[in-house]
Image (spheres, rainbow, N blue to C red):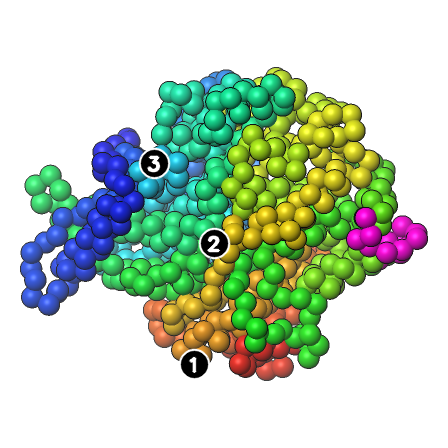
Amino acid sequence: MTSPIPARAALNPTTQARAASIAIALALTSCHGGNGGNTTPQTNVLPSFITSPVKIQSYDGNTDDLLTAGLGKTGLALATAPTIANPSQPTAAELRRLAIWSNYRALVDMTANGGYGRFWGPNVDLNGNDTLGEGKIAGKEYLAFADDGSGKLNVSMLVQIPASFNPDQPCIVTATSSGSRGVYGAISAAGEWGLKRACAVAYTDKGGGNGAHELSTNLVTLIDGTLQDAGTAGNTSIFTANPGGSALAAFNSNFPNRYAFKHAHSQQNPEKDWGKNTLQAIQFAYWALNDSFGTLDGSTRTVRYANGTITTIAASVSNGGGAALAAAEQDTGGWITAVVVGEPQINLRLPAQVSVTQGGVPVGAIGKPLADYMTLANTLQPCAALAPAAAGAPYLSALPLATTTAIRTARCASLAADSVIAGTTVTAQATNALALLHQNGYQTDSDLLQAPMWDSQAVPAVAVTYANAYSQSSVADNLCNFGFGTTSSTGAAGVTPAVSPMLTVFGTGNGVPPTNGINLVYNAGASGAADHRLASADGSYAGAACLRRLWTNGGLTSGVEAIRVNANLHGKPAIIVQGRADALVPINHASRPYLAMNQLAEGGASKLSFYEVTNGQHFDAFLGVAGFDTRFVPVHYYNLQALNLMWNHLKSGTQLPPSQVIHTTPRGGTAGAAPPLSTANLPAIAASPGPDAITVTNGAVNVPN
């Protein structure tokens, strides 16, 4: 049964800030096991940033549940998506099931010989044993928008409270979405662990999510994934593009069947608020727990939990991990107890004294922002893929290999013609392109990943999305001639889809096209608009070079400055886990320099441990692809170990292991048929790492080989 709770009246930002301060002050004076003599119970007031009705839904743990949407361990493992009774009109419940199924599978290895069902999964308990059957978890969800009163932000907030929650031993785990995913985006990365710990889980989509707008039909997504005309939806949509009526009409005329996405086209630069969004999700969770367990006083609930009285771990991976770190830095109200994140995408305000060496040798570069390294990689990777050092890379493209090879060769020629790389042969040019990536902080460990990161379109999609976000461009700006649209079997853009991708974009989209049948297109190809890989012989190099110039010429500077962090965690215990071979968020631009900055900022008060995993890369879901399975290990395994270590530290005082390199062993065998993953591949995090210890002194980090 769904129970709506009315939203608070929309307030202007100044009034909202004042109301929030008052609400926090009231919470601080509330009674929780004694309050300095004040025995007056305080009313549980909905945070002022919640401006939509709160939807409350209970799940029985059988037909439907919090973790698997009723699919159980078996259903989540199926490669076939859950069915929809009426494909032309999916229900909110069906879209939620799709979202949980797709987001769970997107972040972990689901293969039979990998970790699913054996090291993690709904059936695996917190001790790593197969004891939980189908693993369904009963409980309830609170869902609402956070906004500033304008209706332009509409950040999705979701709190899951398992039936096993112990109100006398309360805990919260954040699961801020990774990437630009919807609100369930970190359900396998952090949500599963939190629910098994009987903690409430605080989710947020960070103002990205699957906020899609089908411009040709004016359809938009609502908070539950169902569709509505943008005019009818008004301020209740996840996102509605608003470049102006005449601009939108002209764009639709020139570029039919295109889509706007919230992360790219909201003109909000949502990343600047990711830390705030995570803190708001925690505050919403406090309200939900008070709503569930506070004393009923007439028609209202009283505050049982004042801020700081609930053990709260800020956790997630990738962008969600970066958001958790940003939230911990911004937290001056005692909302966050500890932090555990994996492969955080975080942009640093790097002090000059920070340095990183590996085996005593300085690395190529450190602490570059995503806008820099992503636009560079987007230009160089197709060519670098042809370097001898990258030979034998796993293939991650639906295009024939011959087509991809031709694109790579042409990209090398275009780079050489622009004097970006040197060399008179393709091999020499490719080798030079790979060397430039090394000089800009990419590890040699990730050489075999340069090709699949571009072939899978992960890097081009991120480069386009973030350039739009940082420049606060509208969809009608057609930034660098890139856009999002449906394409034909030959790659031509602008075709009318047989079935609108909007119908299921909330369930199976990831917020960054290509996704759910909406592709990344280049609107200025030799033969017109087309899939960016096919729009020109060199894979739309002119567009990639344009994105790169936006960074080098300062067009993205102000957007990037708004998102930089300082690495001061205010003494909170914290763990960062990252794979050394990460080719999407290079470790030299993320975890390694963050460790150095934290030591400078906090000195002896620092409680940050960093665990660097050899043979670990960014996308554990790719471990089901031939060549990934034999060469790489799941970083998720160590994220779970880190969460357990932090829990024991908080509850039992067990010392956190110091920073260290974890030397794993790949599974080997035949590509696509690697032997079963075992603990022989995954050594434990060492309490005393000895020569594998990572040291940091006066901002200088040394990582052993």
- Residue kind at label 3, given as amino acid type: Ser
Q: Which residue is mark 3?
A: 150
Specify the amino acid type for callout 1. Gly
Task: Using a 10 Å C-alpha cutoff, classify the residue at mark 2 as few (fewer than 14 neighbours), some (14 to 19) or many (20 or more).
Answer: some
Q: Which residue is mark 1?
A: 604
Which of the two labelled residues, at mark 2 and mark 1, occupies the earlier sequence position?
2
The residue under label 2 is 562
Task: Tell me which numbered mark, 2 or 3, is placed earlier along the sequence.
Answer: 3
- Note whether 629 is above or below 352 in the view shown: above
Residue 3 within the magenta-colored segment of the rendering: no
Residue 385 x/y as whole percent? 80, 50
Amino acid type, mark 2: Ala
Residue 633 visible, this angle = no
Q: For the point 48% across and 45% down, which residue is it?
A: 269
Q: Are marks 2 and 3 in contact (CB under 8 Å)?
A: no
Q: Which segment did they paint magenta? A: 418-431
Q: Is residue 280 visible?
A: yes
Of helix, strand and loop, which one carries label 1? helix
Q: Few, some or many C-alpha atoms within 10 Å of disc 1 (few <14, some 14-19, many ≥20)?
A: few
Question: Does residue 426 show up magenta in the picture?
Answer: yes
